[in-house]
Amino acid sequence: MSKAKYYDAIVAPIITEKATILSEYNQVVFEVPLATTKAEIKEAIEQLFKVSVTAVNTMRQKGKTKRFRGHAGRRKDIKKAVVTLKDGDAIDIATGL
């Protein structure tokens, strides 16, 4: 994969209370495109952050139907990737790339 392809495989880090708790277990959560595979996610994380990835778990979250000013709308579907890093490796999400 090219360097630009690595940036396309990762949309953004997810910073929530649960994601912060997972960081204690050497795991980081990212939002990824719906079509991205686990192998592509692993390769992109390893190349962009220079860390070793031991596991990638993915989940698809369906978008909710919400109402705003009486009109029905729908949030987008997203895919999350929980990336487990090798002991000793870390990703500092606050600094960026």
Image (cartoon, rainbow, N blue to C red):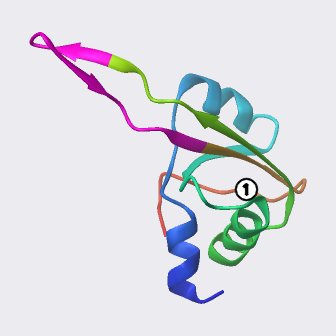
Q: Main secondary structure of the magenta part?
A: strand
Q: Is residue 38 above or below residue 63?
A: below
The percent position of residue 62, horizontal first and vertical second, equals 53, 30
**Residue drawn where x is 70% and y is 63% of the image:** 41
Q: Position of residue 10 (x, y in %)?
A: 55, 62
**Horizontal placement of 80 versus 52: left or right?**
left
Q: Amino acid at mark 1?
A: Ala
Please give the range of residues in magenta.
66-79
Q: Residue at x 73, y 32 (%)?
A: 22
Q: Is residue 1 above or below residue 66?
A: below
| Residue that carries the numbered disc 1 in the rendered image | 90
Is the residue 5 above or below the residue 58 in the image?
below
Does residue 22 appear to the left or right of 78 in the view shown?
Answer: right
> In the rendered structure, does residue 76 fall within the stretch colored magenta?
yes
Figure label count: 1
In this view, the residue farthest toward the left is: 69
Asked if residue 5 lies in the magenta stretch, the reply is: no
Q: Position of residue 15 (x, y in %)?
A: 51, 37
Q: Residue furthest top?
A: 70
Q: Position of residue 28 (x, y in %)?
A: 68, 46
> Vertical placement of 72 versus 14: above or below?
above
- Mark 1 Cα within 10 Å, few/some/many (few <14, many 20+)? some
Element at label 1: loop
Q: Given the current orientation, which residue lies at the most extreme bottom position?
A: 2
Q: Residue at x 56, y 86 (%)?
A: 3
Who's the residue at 66% across and 86% down the image?
1
Q: Nearer the viewer, residue 68 or 32?
A: 68
Question: Left or right: where does residue 77 sit relative to residue 67?
Answer: right
Q: Examine the image and state in which quarter residue 42 appears.
A: bottom right
